[in-house]
């Protein structure tokens, strides 16, 4: 780059990896109750296991058959850095580790002493770390539980942004390794900054995709030293790379950006669902960050899984999003962190919705609709499908919701009328309970039990039932994690013989037999009317 005061833009293939304790950040390692449990029960034991035997972890990380397993993919020569990281966690995260131990202690105390009688005498027996942060309650079957008063926990020492950091680098198109289990260490091609996710300098940086700034201004906004500013300069360009057709001036348009991400547009409004967008614009086989409109009125989040709330896409868009529409949680269940609180704490404007709540906009509306299953039978309410009506068309945004009980979709149809296009996820052989929720479990589950409770969406029969109940004209299968730029989060490996793909074929055949237009989406697709 040239002089510090020349106009510059941020390259479209500049990526940000938001980290907490150097782990790739997602809801269950940021929302403080769940983050404490994951830190104590998963991350610390994982790092300890690595330090005992780095070579086993390295070999397992590189074994394709174990893709997506919880192994640390770091060379043994850098194990001293992992040891330093672990020491830092034990030193700086003592409040979280104490909190997690208190949860386990309190749960076993309740198990023994909450026997259907008055709970008042049990409050003094709670570990001090939980004082003021939980309410004890029975359900109507006298089963006791703790309700975490989550907004308070966010103001307690358990929520400390001090160990948030970001890594900025260029996406060189090489498939990234599975990222959820390996701490990201600093590297020569990476600008590693200890900044909170809500740091305003990050918004200044990403605003430079659509409007010019200067290196000097970015340096000040991000509080960089000379070496860091030189590294930042490699992420900048003297011209923008925005797509000229990113806005429309009449009618309606939907574009599929891969996985569960859709852009629904009219001249007046832009809505993006579950943003997870490629930054690599060299291929032409996909829409990228360059194809997004300059302003996004609403982002719709369907649920909290790590492939549906993707901070490396969301943080760069934060400054141009009007509001993120999120499903309301049950407020306080261990397994059900509030998506709203989580995103607010990172600096987003949030609208929380419940089933059948509406968000009107010029020429249309967003309606939250129920989401069924796909969460290992845990009592998780923070999940929603949506019906979006715009420019005279309606689309059902089904995400991973399943057809376990298809009658539910009849209620949606009765309440909101017929749907034109249904976007359905068919990941019908999902990961087992423990893959995602192990850290939150305070009682062990058997492998057999865990394997019986998968994170599964609809199979062919269930998808067909949904189509019949919704009375939808067109079916589009999406959210399968098949696109090449998602592997670091998804760890999916499909072959021709994969059960899910066979189920999709069966469903497509059913659609043909019933005169329904249907398609299995991959990479990119556009609908215009
Ligand atoms: Fe999911
Ligand atoms: Fe998903």
Image (cartoon, grey):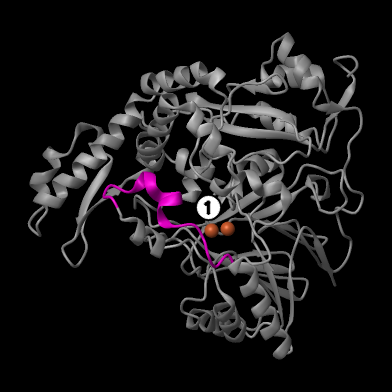
Question: Is 503 placed left or right of 439 in the picture?
Answer: right
Q: Is residue 442 magenta?
A: yes
Q: Where in the figure is residue 314, as x and y percent of width and height?
A: 65, 44
Q: In the depicted view, which residue is nearer to us: 439 or 150?
A: 439
Is there any visible trace of residue 346 in the rendered image? no
Label 1 sits on residue:
305
| Residue at the spot 57% in from the left edge and 46% down from the top edge | 67
For residue 92, which quarter of the picture? top left
318 vs 445, left or right, is right
Crowd rating for badge 1 (residues with CA inside 10 Å; few <14, some 14–19, many 20+)? some
Instruction: Look at 22% across and 36% down and name the residue there.
Output: 131
Query: Measured from the top left, where is residue 185 in percent x and y?
Result: 58, 24
Q: Quadrant of residue 266?
A: bottom right
Q: Does the residue tagged 1 have its C-beta within 8 Å of any atom of ligand 1?
A: yes
Quarter that holds the C terminus: bottom right
Q: Is residue 194 above or below residue 13?
A: above
Q: Which quadrant of the figure has residue 258?
A: bottom right
Measuring 46% from the left and 17% from the top, which residue is drawn there? 84
The region drawn magenta spans 425-444
Q: Is residue 428 left or right of residue 172?
A: left
Q: Position of residue 90 (x, y in %)?
A: 37, 22
């Amino acid at each position: 780059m040239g002089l510090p005061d020349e106009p510059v833009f941020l390259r479209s293939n500049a990526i940000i990896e938001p980290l907490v304790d150097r782990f790739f950040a997602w809801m269950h390692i940021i929302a403080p109750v769940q983050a404490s449990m994951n830190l104590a029960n998963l991350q610390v034991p994982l790092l300890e296991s690595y330090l005992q035997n780095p070579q086993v972890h390295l070999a397992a990380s590189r074994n394709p058959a174990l893709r997506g397993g919880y192994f640390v993919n770091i060379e043994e020569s850098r194990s001293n850095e992992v040891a330093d990281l672990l020491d830092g966690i034990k030193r700086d995260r003592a409040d979280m580790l104490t909190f997690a131990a208190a949860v386990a202690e309190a749960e076993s105390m309740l198990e023994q002493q909450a026997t259907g009688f008055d709970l008042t005498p049990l409050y003094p027996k709670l570990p001090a770390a939980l004082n003021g942060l939980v309410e004890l309650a029975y359900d109507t079957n006298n089963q006791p539980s703790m309700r975490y008063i989550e907004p308070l926990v966010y103001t307690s020492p358990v929520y400390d942004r001090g160990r948030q950091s970001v890594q900025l680098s260029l996406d060189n198109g090489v498939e990234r390794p599975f990222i959820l289990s390996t701490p990201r260490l600093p590297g020569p091609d990476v600008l590693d900054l200890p900044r909170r996710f809500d740091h305003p300098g990050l918004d200044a940086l990403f605003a430079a995709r659509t409007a010019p700034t200067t290196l000097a201004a970015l340096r000040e906004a991000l509080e960089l030293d000379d070496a860091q500013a030189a590294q930042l300069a490699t992420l900048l360009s003297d011209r923008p790379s925005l797509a000229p057709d990113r806005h429309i001036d009449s009618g309606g348009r939907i574009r599929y950006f891969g996985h569960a991400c859709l852009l629904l547009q009219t001249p007046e409004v832009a809505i993006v669902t579950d943003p997870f967008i490629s930054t690599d614009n060299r291929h032409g086989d996909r829409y990228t960050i360059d194809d997004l409109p300059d302003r996004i009125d609403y982002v719709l989040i369907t649920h909290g899984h790590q492939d549906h709330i993707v901070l490396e896409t969301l943080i760069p868009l934060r400054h141009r999003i009007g509001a993120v529409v999120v499903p309301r949680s049950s407020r306080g269940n261990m397994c059900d962190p509030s998506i709203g609180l989580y995103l607010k704490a990172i600096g987003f404007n949030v609208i929380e919705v419940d089933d059948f709540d509406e968000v009107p906009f010029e020429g249309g509306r967003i309606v939250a609709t129920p989401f069924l299953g796909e969460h290992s039978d845990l009592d998780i309410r923070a999940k929603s499908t949506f019906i979006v009506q715009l420019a005279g068309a309606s689309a059902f945004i089904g995400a991973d919701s399943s057809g376990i009980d298809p009658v539910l979709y009849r209620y949606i149809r009765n309440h909101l009328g017929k749907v034109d296009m249904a976007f359905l996820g068919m990941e019908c052989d999902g990961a087992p309970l423990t893959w995602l929720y192990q850290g939150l479990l305070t009682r062990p589950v058997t492998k057999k039990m865990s394997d019986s409770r998968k994170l599964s969406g609809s199979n062919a029969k269930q998808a067909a039932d949904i189509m019949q109940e919704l009375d939808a004209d067109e079916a589009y299968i999406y959210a399968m994690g098949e696109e090449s730029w998602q592997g670091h989060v998804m760890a999916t490996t499909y072959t021709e013989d994969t059960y899910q793909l066979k189920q999709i074929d069966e469903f497509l055949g059913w659609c043909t037999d019933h005169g329904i237009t249907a398609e299995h989406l991959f990479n990119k697709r556009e609908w215009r009317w």
